[in-house]
Image (spheres, rainbow, N blue to C red):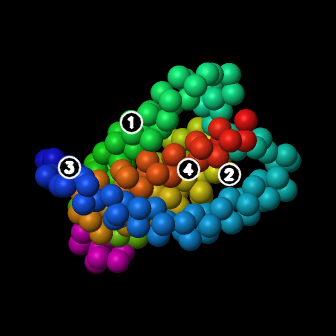
Amino acid sequence: LREDIGLGPVNVFKEIIPGLVTYAMGLPVLLVGLLLSIVLGFVLNVLFGEQPAASHPIQAIIGEGGWMTIVLIFLVACVGAPVTEEIMFRGVLYRYLREFSRTWGILLSLFFSMLVSSFIFAAVHPQGLTFIPVLGSLAVAFCIGREWRGSLAAPMIAHGVSNGAVLTLNISLF
């Protein structure tokens, strides 16, 4: 079961470079997600009026907390969340969807599994509707890393780097 969900024996140190490559490979995909978010925001604004800006509840905690709070948030965001979310979304859900769709052909199975698991991943985050394409695009990159490496180590590293970059940017803006 551990190997099926991508937690088999792996040298994590040998996965650092592939994890960074997964993150870097995801940046162009992220740009597409950002453009889709802008279009979605525009459409929602036209249809329903002004939409709230994308944000995360952790921003208030960062603004009010001291250095120890920030260190703890970094640990949770860059280690805890990537491990937990990668096991749930790329380990269990993505693998289940790949198995479920295996008779559809490799490309359709990959596309379906990446799209569905990435959408659910993005939708459960509290940033709001307009941020789903951005988070979903990152999730697609993590799926590609999962497929490429056959384990969750590279996607976990890429996820941690992504969260660390966003958190660092958030802190520097406060």
Q: Residues within 10 Å of mark 1 (few under 14, many from 20)?
A: some
Observer-nearest residue: 141 or 76? 76
Q: Which residue is mark 4?
A: 165
Q: Secondary structure at mark 1?
A: helix
Observer-nearest residue: 2 or 107? 2
What separation in Å lies between label 1 and label 2 (alpha carbons)?
25 Å
* Foreground disc of the pair 4, 2: 4
Q: Which residue is mark 2?
A: 130
What separation in Å lies between label 4 and label 2 (alpha carbons)?
20 Å
Residue ID at (59%, 58%): 133
- Residue farthest along the front direction in this orientation: 67
Question: What is the magenta range?
Answer: 102-109
Q: Amino acid at mark 2?
A: Thr
Q: Which residue is mark 1?
A: 80
What separation in Å lies between label 4 and label 3 (alpha carbons)?
25 Å
What separation in Å lies between label 3 and label 2 (alpha carbons)?
32 Å
